[in-house]
């Protein structure tokens, strides 16, 4: 009895099975949510270009980094907000398409306001007030764009 056709069939099946296992174990797509968390903050964590119009300082452009606060699932950290410096952090709370900046004193500046996020997460429009201790309140609007 000749087992050559059966051996050939098993070799072909083993080869096909190996290829199928290899293909199904490959990752062909980019992870949209790399930490697998469904965290809505992931939509806005990025570096943004701020075009700010200040009642005191006029118009200016600078970069703001938005990161997740690691100890609170709704909080954000905005670095260089109001062009205070990369190491200066303002806290914000995300609720839907709004970022709320509750009154806080940061680097001697009392800051409060809110931002509205565009539906496609490409723009954030902020309105906020800053009081630097001099008694004069700065009314500010800023438009953030992803870079």
Image (cartoon, grey):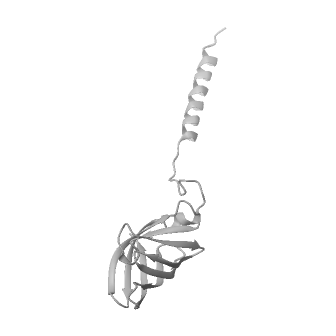
Could you say which is closer to the camera, residue 118 or residue 28?
A: 118
Residue lying farthest to the top in this orientation: 1
Q: Quadrant of the C terminus?
A: bottom left
**Percent from the top left, x then y, of residue 109?**
42, 80
Above/below status of 133 relative to 47: below
Left or right: 84 as drawn, with respect to 73? left
Residue 40 placement: quadrant: bottom right
Could you say which is closer to the camera, residue 55 or residue 44?
A: 55
Residue lying farthest to the right in this orientation: 1
**Percent from the top left, x then y, of residue 97?**
57, 76
User: Residue at image x 56%, y 60%?
Assistant: 71
Could you say which is closer to the camera, residue 2 or residue 101?
A: 101
User: Residue at image x 59%, y 20%?
Assistant: 8
User: Residue at image x 42%, y 82%?
Assistant: 142
**Percent from the top left, x then y, of residue 39?**
58, 62
Q: Quadrant of the N terminus?
A: top right
**Percent from the top left, x then y, of residue 67?**
47, 64
Could you say which is closer to the camera, residue 146 or residue 58?
A: 58
How many circles with numbers are drawn on the protein? 0
């Amino acid at each position: 009895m000749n087992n050559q056709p059966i051996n050939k069939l098993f070799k072909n099946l083993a080869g096909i099975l190996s290829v199928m296992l290899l293909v199904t174990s490959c990752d062909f797509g980019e992870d949209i949510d790399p930490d697998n968390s469904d965290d809505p903050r992931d939509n806005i964590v990025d570096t943004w270009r701020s075009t700010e119009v200040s009642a005191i300082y006029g118009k200016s452009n600078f970069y703001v980094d938005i990161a997740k606060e690691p100890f609170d699932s709704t909080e954000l950290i905005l670095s260089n907000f109001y062009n205070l410096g990369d190491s200066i952090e303002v806290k914000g709370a995300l609720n839907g398409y709004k970022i709320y900046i509750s009154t806080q004193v940061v680097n001697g500046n009392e800051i409060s306001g809110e931002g509205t996020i565009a539906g496609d997460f490409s723009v954030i429009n902020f309105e906020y007030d800053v009081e630097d201790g001099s008694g004069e309140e700065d009314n500010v609007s800023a438009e953030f764009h992803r870079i």
